[in-house]
Image (cartoon, rainbow, N blue to C red):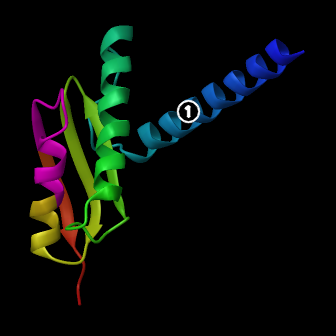
Amino acid sequence: MKTIQLLKTAGSIACVAFALNATNAMAQSSAPSAASETIGQHVDDGTITTKAKADLLAAKNVKSTHIHVKTRKGVVWLTGTVPSADDKAAAGEVVEAVKGVSSVKNHLKIAAE
């Protein structure tokens, strides 16, 4: 009985993760497509994206939650809005520190005050 519940829970988590990744991929049309990406690259890129998002949320020097992250072959695209140039720079620095990131394309816009 516990095994069935564990499998149901794992399946639910996998479905949510897939849905979030698919939604993010559709929302980030400015980033390159994943048509030629291998399974290994996709898993690695997904891990980088997840870690980058978590680190951005945890960063004390980044004040925006309106940052979208897309990763392709280790290159991370940041889009969305931040309140200041300092937040834009800090977000780029946070993401550059994530293991596996080869470069960051910081396309964050600074919100008008």
What span is in magenta?
91-104
Is any part of residue 13 visible from this angle? yes
Quarter holding the C terminus is: bottom left
Q: Residue furthest bottom?
A: 113
Side of 53 where 72 appears, left or right: left
Task: Place residue 71 in its image quadrant.
Answer: top left
Residue 97 in the image: x percent, y percent? Answer: 13, 41
Side of 52 where 27 appears, left or right: right
Q: Is residue 29 above or below residue 11?
A: below
Side of 68 where 95 appears, left or right: left
Question: In this view of the protein, which residue sits in the foreground, 79 or 36?
Answer: 79
* Other-residue count near label 1 (Cα within 10 Å), few / some / many at <14 / 14–19 / ≥20: few
The type of residue carrying mark 1 is Ala
Q: Is residue 66 above or below residue 76?
A: below
Q: Is residue 19 above or below residue 68?
A: above
Q: Residue at x 20, y 61 (%)?
A: 108
Side of 85 where 32 appears, left or right: right
Q: Secondary structure at mark 1?
A: helix
Residue identifier under label 1: 17
Question: In this view of the protein, which residue sits in the foreground, 113 or 91?
Answer: 91
Q: Residue at x 34, y 47 (%)?
A: 53
Q: Residue at x 35, y 43 (%)?
A: 29
Residue 40 in the image: x percent, y percent? Answer: 34, 10
Quarter holding the N terminus is: top right
Question: In this view of the protein, which residue sits in the foreground, 47 or 6?
Answer: 6
Residue 18 in the image: x percent, y percent? Answer: 56, 29
Residue 65 in the image: x percent, y percent? Answer: 37, 65
96 in magenta: yes
Is any part of residue 38 visible from this angle? no
